[in-house]
Amino acid sequence: MKSFNYKTATSTKEAIKLFSGRSAFLAGGMTLLPAIKLRLAAYSDLINIKKIKGLSGIRASSKSLKIGSAITHAAVASSKEVIKSIPSLALLADGIGDPQVRNRGTIGGSIANNDPAADYPAACLALNATIHTNKRKIPADKFFKGMFETDLKKGELIEAIEFEVPEKSSYTKFPNPASRYAIVGVYIAKLKKEIRVAVTGVESCVFRCKKIEKALTDNFSESSIDNINISSNGFNSDIHASAEYRAHIIKVMAKKAVSTC
Amino acid sequence: MANVNIKINGKKISKEISDNILLSDFLRDKLLLTGTHIGCDTSQCGACVVHLNGNSVKSCTTLVADCDGCEVTTIEGLSSNGKMHVMQESFKKHHGLQCGFCTPGMVMSAIDLLQKNKNPNEQEIRDWLEGNICRCTGYQNIVAAVKDAASKM
Ligand SMILES: Cc1cc2nc3c(=O)[nH]c(=O)nc-3n(C[C@H](O)[C@H](O)[C@H](O)COP(=O)(O)OP(=O)(O)OC[C@H]3O[C@@H](n4cnc5c(N)ncnc54)[C@H](O)[C@@H]3O)c2cc1C
Ligand code: FES
Ligand code: FES
């Protein structure tokens, strides 16, 4: 593997100070290390952020659930606070990859990476999340910009993700049987003020499906999804699924999500 | 270069390492613990699974630098006084291996499952072994081995 300097930060301040133009923050490394090995990326310094205490808390109130960016998928899946406050989020975490990926991979790493087929970005959009960084608070609606692209600036560190606690919610994924990444994933959340429906795995970036949102706002039932016409225009088409198939599966997953809300 | 202190299979070691060395290469090339296998080297196959502070991880995607102050257990650390671990016995009894390439990772992964779920059903075993690929057995005997081990552990 290409060489780099490994540094450990024990505070956000130190992490920012250690960061130079050719650095990367290292969380679980489940995406970063394979990328370096495959020579898709190269850095002079990796800055380990897992020892920063401020990134590893989970705090629930009646209105919101705030999860530190360095919390692993396994810890979210088994957290009593998460299971009580937003059970669909614990289930989502439990369905990421495999146990070893869940033991290392973190929520902050997943969101910063913004893989088009990742699960957490759908949760952020559906649960109207706020991404807390060392500089500012970014609404999820503005955070996910495109394929592997986010609103984060160079050297900006995600500290926590704050989700709105919904009245009810559910995430349903049609997983790639090998990696468990979403071929299609649909997250439905009935929030206090609105219904949000986020779709992942389907385009180059996670998106909200306004058509399903409107149908469910008029009538929150499986049958209200039946008559929606989802155009496959611009959808991913690959060896796993054609664009038309993905368009069909969105409705199937959405109905399943409504029935398990 | 940096110095790391790690407890590996119960033995404390202190070594100078390069910043970019992976746990899988360190175990095999520096410590000659070749029981941990490298299959895909890109975190897909699970042949390299070891325990880090008690949890199963893929050693091909873990930096040794990240393990400073931690405990690592490999397949070599399972037997005691020449006696195999219950899980190893069970894989042998149920013929849960053919070529054996995936086996160290399978065994380490399966033990982690039983630490977290003492009595898993067949579906839970299959779900847990999602990250371990076997090109020989067709999984049936592996699942039978884990089930049987659960009744004995
Ligand atoms: C076999 C396999 C299967 C997988 N299956 C799934 C799946 O089904 N669903 C899914 O959603 N994901 C899946 N993943 C991805 C997994 O969830 C990763 O853990 C995740 O994408 C990256 O998290 P990480 O903590 O490992 O980040 P790292 O690999 O350490 O970092 C990833 C990127 O994020 C940056 N970064 C990390 N933390 C921060 C932070 N706090 N602030 C700013 N930038 C940061 C890093 O610099 C890097 O660019 C899978 C991965 C593998 C290897
Ligand atoms: S060698 Fe590590 S997962 Fe395949
Ligand atoms: S026994 Fe040969 S790969 Fe599993």
Image (tube, rainbow, N blue to C red):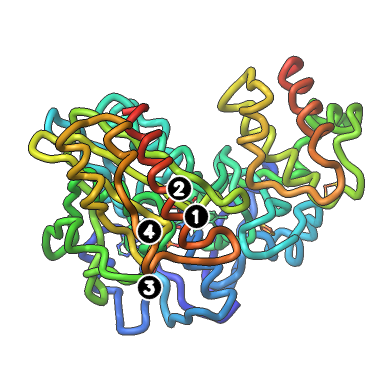
Residue A245 tag number: 1
Q: Residues within 10 Å of mark 4 (few under 14, many from 20)?
A: many
Q: Position of residue A242 (x, y in %)?
A: 52, 61
Q: Tell me which label, 3 or 2, sits earlier in the chain.
A: 3
How packed mark 1 is, by other alpha carbons closer than 10 Å (few <14, some 14-19, many 20 or more), is some
> Which amino acid is tagged 1?
Tyr
Camera-near label (1 vs 4) is 1
Q: Quadrant of residue A47?
A: bottom left
N-terminal-most mark, 4 or 3: 3
The Cα–Cα distance between marks 1 and 2, rounded to whole angstroms, is: 6 Å
**Host chain of mark 1:** A
Q: What secondary structure is marked by label 1?
A: helix
Q: Which mark sits nearer the N-terminus, 1 or 4?
A: 4
Q: Secondary structure at mark 4?
A: helix
- Does B67 appear above or below A194? below
**Residue type, label 4:** Gly
Q: Which residue is mark 4?
A: A109
**Which of pointers 3 and 2 indicates the residue nearer the eye?**
2
Chain of the residue on which disc 2 is drawn: A
Indicate which disc residue A24 carries: 3
Upstream in sequence: badge 4 or badge 2: 4
Q: Nearer the viewer, mark 1 or mark 3?
A: 1
Q: Quadrant of residue A121?
A: bottom left
Which SS class for mark 3? strand
Label 3 within 8 A of ligand 1 by Cβ: yes
Which residue corresponds to the image point at 76% horizontal and 44% vertical from the top-left? B75
Q: Answer yes or no: do the residues labelled 1 and 3 have beta carbons within 8 Å? A: no
**Badge 3 amino acid:** Ala
